[in-house]
Amino acid sequence: SELFIFCSYSGKRKCTNMVVVLIEPLSGYVPDKNSLKELEQNPAVSRTEVSAKKISIYMNKLTHETESFTFSLEQETIVENLQPATIVVSDYYDPAEHAGVEYYAPCSGVVAHCEVSAEERAECGHPGITEEQCVERGCCYNAMVHGSKWCFAKGFKKIEKQ
């Protein structure tokens, strides 16, 4: 599974100090080390670290422009009733400036995942994304609800922001 992360700074300053993105992998999943090495080629990423319970991605700074990156998670163990995991982005030198989200495994093997109201749809793509590109990301595609997100996932929920 690919984990796509989009983040930007929404505070009052022009940019942050160094930022750390702390990713709790979903239960039963581990990061693909090769994809993390590739991620370190991204000019916005200074380094990555992996421990038993988290993946840390260090970035020199965040601005008001969206940064995006991706890496692979491999399923080592099948876990039933998979619970959400968290991603927290924080200013390394000013941890009071942080934001976090919960994320779920895309579709989690359950067809009902895609049957969510327009209000529950969390963006999973970008403007102009095709149905094929959306599905390749493991997301749901439904253009039937006018004015709602067409490429979406259920479960990206803000848990805190300061």
Image (spheres, grey):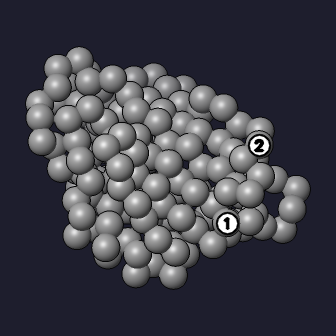
Is 4 on the left-hand or right-hand side of 111?
right
Q: Position of residue 51 (x, y in %)?
A: 35, 49
Residue 92 in picture, x, y percent from top left: 67, 57
Mark 1: which secondary structure? loop
Image quadrant for the C terminus? top right
Q: Sequence order check: which comes first, mark 2 or mark 1?
A: 1
Along the line of sight, the residue nearer the viewer: 116 or 106: 106
Where is residue 9 shown, x and y percent of the image?
A: 71, 58
- Helix, strand, or loop for circle 2? strand
| Residue hosting label 1 | 18
Q: Amino acid at mark 2?
A: Ala
Q: Residue furthest front?
A: 51
Which three-letter amino acid code belongs to the residue tagged 1? Met
Give the side of residue 110 with respect to residue 99, left or right: left
**Which is nearer the eye, 28 or 116?**
28
Determine which quarter of the picture holds residue 133: bottom left
Q: Is residue 93 visible?
A: yes
Kindly identify which numbered label has been placed on residue 152: none
Farthest residue in the top direction? 81
Relative to 37, does residue 90 appear above or below in the rendering? above
Q: Quadrant of residue 158?
A: top right
Residue depicted at x 40% and y 52%: 55
**Residue drawn at point x = 38 percent, y = 71 percent:** 39
Q: Nearer the viewer, residue 13 or 135?
A: 13
What is the distance, in whole Å, between disc 2 and disc 1 at their CAs? 13 Å
Find disc 2 in the rendering and name its residue.
Answer: 96
- At label 2, counting other C-alpha atoms closer than 10 Å, the crowd grade (few under 14, some 14-19, many 20 or more) is few
